Amino acid sequence: MIRLKQMKFKYFYQQFFSYISIIIIAFLVLSILFTHYVEDLVYQNKADELISYGKAMIKDIKRTPEAQNQVINQYSNVLASRNMSFSIFNSSGVLYAVGRPGPTIRGLTDSDWNQITKGKTVVVKSDYTRFGLGGVTFVVLPYLENGKFEGGILLTSPISGSSVMIHQINQILIYMIFIALGVSILLSWILSRIHVKRIKRLREATSLVSAGNYHVKVKSSNFDEIGELANDFNLMVDKLNTQMEEINSLESRRRQFMSDVSHEMRTPLTTISGVIEGLKNGMISEEDKARGINLVSHEAKRLIRLVNENLDYDKIRSNQIQLFREDIQVLEVLEIIQDQLLLQADEKNDQIIVDAPPELIVNADYDRLIQILINIAKNSIQFTSNGTICLRGRRGEKETIIEIEDTGIGIDPTEVKKIWRRFYKADISRTSNPYGEFGLGLSIVKSLVLLHNGEIDVFSEKGKGTKFVIRFKDQQ
């Protein structure tokens, strides 16, 4: 099946021909209206002039009926000098005085005659056939005596002079149309080029964005819709750029996380595999078997912890965690944390101090509260040697505040806002130092605090320790 290529009509030509068409149509309409107005004006002036002469003749004839012939001769000379003619007829339509050859009442229609006999003036602006004399303008004025129709005067004037004047006006209009058309073509071309250039810039910018360049900008304004479109385009590119940076950052952190998880899982799996092979092949002595089994148990728990952290985070993000809130004594919880982490603190030569009033109560999910405090306290122990970890509880305004403060190595200011991100690991954990890593723990901590409608902040200074402040709002 042969497909015909669709013909393209460039936007420039669409704009250009649209402008030209509108201007041409507008000029044609204006020219026709103007010409018609001028013609009406010329013929009306001519008719008014004829009517004024006719009324003057009737008035003079009425005033001096004995000198009627003299009046007729005088007006005949005056009208002849102005290329006008007249005819006087009686009530029967019979002519009895003719100033110069001209149309007769035989050319009048029955409707015209009825109007005249009723005392009304008949005006015909132009007529080319009814009187056989070419184009004329004529008026017929009735002559009334005591309200009775006695006859009338028919005055005519050829329209040759008026036609010449109208023809000259039309010529001037044609010249003006051509001049205006030339100017309009130039302006239309300029305006079309401007609009097309602006649209072309948008199109080129769109092509760059489709090619993956999210830093492109176009000149924008609020002058018209194209300028507003450019504004919207720039906003779109900014959002795309931000989203792409987030995607790239997430992808980078995902790769790093997968690498770290793989490394962290490989180490305990290698240890477990080695111990099992040793036990299986009798390569481990009886006195070392208990130690080997304890090592396998420790590494298995480490793997379980890693898997559980990932599962917990995904459950929190998908709102699958259900909280069972209750009133909990803060001092009791902090002492439990102290007991659970005492051995880890001793290994780092750290001291855990608990400071909270016995009456202090927090409304929270017990298991999740323990999980929050354990994660933070473990991090404090990881980054503190020969120091102090202080667990505090105090009452705020319509809230319960729990603080965990250490005297460890602190966090670099550039890292503080990043520690809550999933997959994020502080730079310090990427080295071979003994301090471990943040991993998923703090991401889970923040999600659980937010799930309690609480707030968590961290304050740290490099080399001077870190303080986590958790605020649990009172239940209404």
Image (tube, helix red, strand yellow):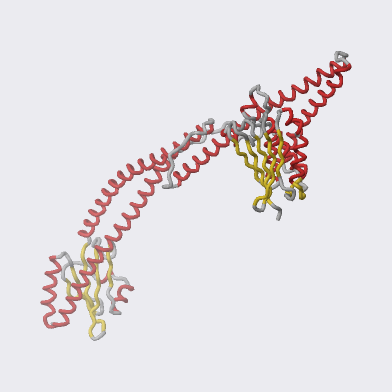
- Residue drawn at x 31%, y 54% is 31
Whether residue 25 is visible, yes or no, is yes
Residue nearer the viewer, 216 or 316: 316
- Residue drawn at x 17%, y 76% is 57
Where is residue 146? Give x, y as percent. Answer: 24, 86
Image quarter of the N terminus: top right
Q: Is residue 282 above or below residue 185?
A: above
Residue nearer the viewer, 371 or 186: 371
- Residue drawn at x 50%, y 43% is 232
Q: Would you identify the image quadrant in which residue 68 lies? A: bottom left
Please give left or right for residue 51 compared with residue 299 in the image. left
Image quarter of the C terminus: bottom right
Where is residue 410? Give x, y as percent. Answer: 61, 32
Where is residue 473? Give x, y as percent. Answer: 68, 50
Whether residue 251 is visible, yes or no, is no
Please give left or right for residue 444 compared with residue 204 in the image. right
Q: Would you identify the image quadrant in which residue 442 lies? A: top right
Residue at the limit of the structure toward the bottom, as seen here: 146
- Residue drawn at x 35%, y 41% is 190
Query: How many labels, in total?
Result: 0
Residue nearer the viewer, 154 or 297: 297
